[in-house]
Image (cartoon, coloured by chain):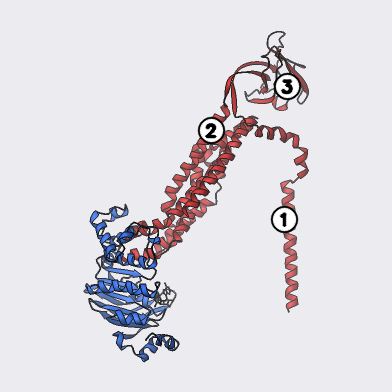
Chain colours: A red, B blue
Amino acid sequence: MENRLSTGKIIRNTLLAALIILALGISWNVTGVDFPRLIRDLPKGRNIVLAFLTPDLTTRETTTTTVSLAFPIPCGSAPEGEVLTSGPRLVPSVTCAEPKTKFTLEGFDLAPNSEIVIRWKLPDERIMTAIRVQSDEKGYFTANMEARPIAATANNISSRLEVDALTPVGGLKPSEAVQDVLAAMFVTIFMALLSTTLATIVAAPLSFLAASNITKRGPLGTLVYYFTRSIFNLLRSYDPLVMATVFGFWLSFGAFPGFLALSVVTVASLGKLFSEAVEGIDPGPLEALQATGANRLQMVIYGVVPQIVPDFISFIIYHWDINVRISTIIGFVGGGGIGYYLSERINGFEYSKAGTAIWAIVLVVMAMDFLSAEVRKRLS
Amino acid sequence: MLRIQHVSKTYPNGTQALKDVSFDVADGEFMVVIGLSGSGKSTLLRCINRLIDPSEGKIYWNDTDVTSANAAELRNIRRNIGMVFQQFNLVKRSSVLTNVLSGRLGYANPWLSLLGIWPQEEKDRALKALARVGIAEKAFSRADALSGGQQQRVGIARALMQEPKIILADEPVASLDPVLSHSILQYLEVLNKEGITVICSLHFLDLVHRYATRVVALKDGMKVFEGSAKEIDRAKFKEIYGEEAQEVRAASF
Ligand SMILES: Nc1ncnc2c1ncn2[C@@H]1O[C@H](COP(=O)(O)OP(=O)(O)OP(=O)(O)O)[C@@H](O)[C@H]1O
Ligand SMILES: [Mg+2]
C-alpha cells in the first residue's frame, strides 16, 4: 500500500519535471536566446554605450560655421552636389554612392583647430550624427564615411552631408541637452507627483468603502464593499503602459494622457493598500468611541484616521517613487517628460543626449528611492 | 434604575453567550458581574449600551426602552453611559487630551468636532477630568507614551466627559497589577459615591468583596447568583467557578 503510493508520487513528480523542462525549452526558443551574440555584436553596441557613457553635459560657447553638400544615395537618384574649389568646402572621394559603399570625406579651409561634427541631414530633415573629428591648423580634416542606407534619397530629395566646425570662444556652460533634460525631468517628477496626489484624493475615501470593518455591514454595505473591491481589482489588472497608450490615442500624446493613465493605475493600487491599512486597525478605540455616542463619521475621524495616517503617508511616498519610474517608461509611448525626450533622442541617433537623459533618470530614481525609504523609516 | 429582562444573546456563529438573564440595577449601585472566562460578562455589559444587540429580551433605563431605540435615540442614551475597557481602547497615536475630548463627541457640534475644533469650555472640562484622575500634566502626551495604569485613568477621564449616569467597566483592572487595580477601582468608587451607577465585571474575588454593593454571577451565559458579596460561600463559589478553580481560589477567600 505504502509502496504503491510512493510509486504514484514518483510518476507524478517525473511528469511534473518533464513538463517544467519542456516549458523552459519552449521559452528558450521563443526568446531567441543567443549569448554569443553579445560578443559578436559588441562593436555595434560599443558606439552607443560609449555615447551613453560620455553624456552631453557642457558646451563651450562656440561659433559654428556650417558647410554642406548634397550626396545622392544611390547614384542618379537625385542631382549631385557641386564640389567647390575654394573657400570652406567639402570634397568627398566620390560625389554619389551605392548604399553601404565606403568613401573618404575631406574638408578644406574650415576653422582651424576646431571640433568638426559630420552628419547626415536626411531627406525628412532629421539629423543623424556620423562622427566627430578635429581640424588641423590649416582647417583641414579627413574622415572615413559610409553611405548609410538610411540616408538614401527619398522623394527625389537626397540627403546632405553637413559639417559643423565649432570654434570655442569663452567658457564652459551646461549644454542644451542638460537644460532640456532638466526641463523634461521636471515634467516627469511633477507628473508623478500630481498623479499620485489625484490618486490619493480619489483612493482615500474609496478605500474606506472597500474596508470590510467599516463598510461590510448590512446588505447595502456588503454590496458597496464588493463593488469597490471589484473596481480596484479591475483597474489594477490594467498595465499603466497599455492604459497610457489608450489615453494617448484618445487625447493625443503628451504629458496629460500619461498623467491620467498613471492616476488611474495608482488609484487602484493605493486603494487596495489603503483599504488593507484601514482593515488592519485596532477596533478597540472604535468601540470606545461608539460607546460615547459618537456618530459614524466622528468614529472615522477620531478613531480610524489617527491610526492610518502614517501608513497612508508611507504608501503615498512609495507610490510617488514608483510613479516617477513608470512615468519615465510611459514617456516612451508618448506620455511626455523625460521618457519622451529619451525616446526622441534615441530615434534621432543623438546618443550623447540620450546618455544625459539616462544619467538623469538613474540619479533621480536613486534619489527618490533614498528619500522615500528615509521618510518611511522615520514614520514607522 | 436599569432593568434587564430576559436578555439572551446568540452570536451569528451559534454561540449562546447569554441565556435569559434578568436583574435590576438601582441608581447609585456598584454592581459587580463575576464569572469564568467566556461566561458572558462582556456580552452582558455591551448589551446594556447596545454595542451588541441582544437577540431576545428587553433593557429599560428608567422609562426608556434601550432595546428598541433607533440610531439617534441610541446615541443619546449612549452618551449618558460611560464605558471603561480592559484594554483601555485609547487612540494610541492621539494626544491624551484628544482622547479625553472624544468622550464628548455625543454632545459636540458634529461639524466642528469633525474639524477637530473644540470650544474652550470643553477643553477646560477635559483638563478638569484629567486632573480628577491625577494626570493633568499628561494632557499633551501621546496616549501610548503612558503606562497602563495611566492609560486606564485616561479611559476614566474620557468616560467622565460624558457626564454619565452609568459607567460600564469591563474588567477595567485585568491588564494591571494588583496595586494599580486598587487605585483605578478607587476612582470608580469615588464616582459611585457621587451618584454614578457603576456596573463592573471583575475577576478577583477580594476586589469584589472590597467594592461591590451587589454581585451578579454568570455561568455559561446564565445568571447563577445575585446578592451581596458576603453571601458567596464555598458552595456558591464552587457553583460559579467550578470544581477545579476551588483550591486555587480558596486561598484568596
Ligand atoms: N463576536 C463573537 N462572535 C461569536 N462568539 C462570541 C463573540 N464574542 C464572544 N463570543 C463567545 O460568547 C461567549 C461569551 O463571551 P464573553 O466575551 O461575553 O465572555 P466573558 O465572560 O467576557 O469572558 P472573558 O472573561 O474571557 O472576557 C464566549 O463563548 C465567547 O467565545
Ligand atoms: Mg470579557
> Residue B109: where, in percent of width, then height?
26, 56
- Compute the Cα span from label 2 to label 1: 45 Å
- Compute the Cα span from label 1 to label 3: 48 Å
Q: Circle 3 sits in a helix, a strand or a loop, which is it?
A: loop
Residue where numbered disc 3 is placed: A73
Q: Toward the viewer: B187 or B101?
A: B187
Furthest residue in direction top, as rendered: A86
Asked if disc 1 is less than 8 Å from ligand 1, the answer is: no
Asked if disc 3 is less than 8 Å from ligand 1, the answer is: no
The chain under label 3 reads A
Q: Quadrant of residue B76?
A: bottom left
Q: Identify which amino acid the numbered label 2 is placed on.
A: Leu
Q: Circle 2 sits in a helix, a strand or a loop, which is it?
A: helix
Residue where numbered disc 1 is placed: A23
> Residue A93: where, in percent of width, then height?
77, 16
Question: Which numbered tag is attached to residue A182?
Answer: 2
The chain under label 1 reads A
Query: From this viewpoint, is residue B67 visible?
Result: no
Q: Are marks 2 and 1 in contact (CB under 8 Å)?
A: no
Q: Toward the viewer: A326 or B6?
A: A326
- Compute the Cα span from label 3 to label 2: 38 Å
In the picture provided, is A131 more to the left or to the right than B113? right
> Residue B139: where, in percent of width, then height?
32, 58
Task: Give the vertical position of B40 relative to A368 (above or below).
Answer: below
Q: Residues within 10 Å of mark 2 (few under 14, many from 20)?
A: some
Question: Ligand 1 is in which quadrant of the figure?
Answer: bottom left
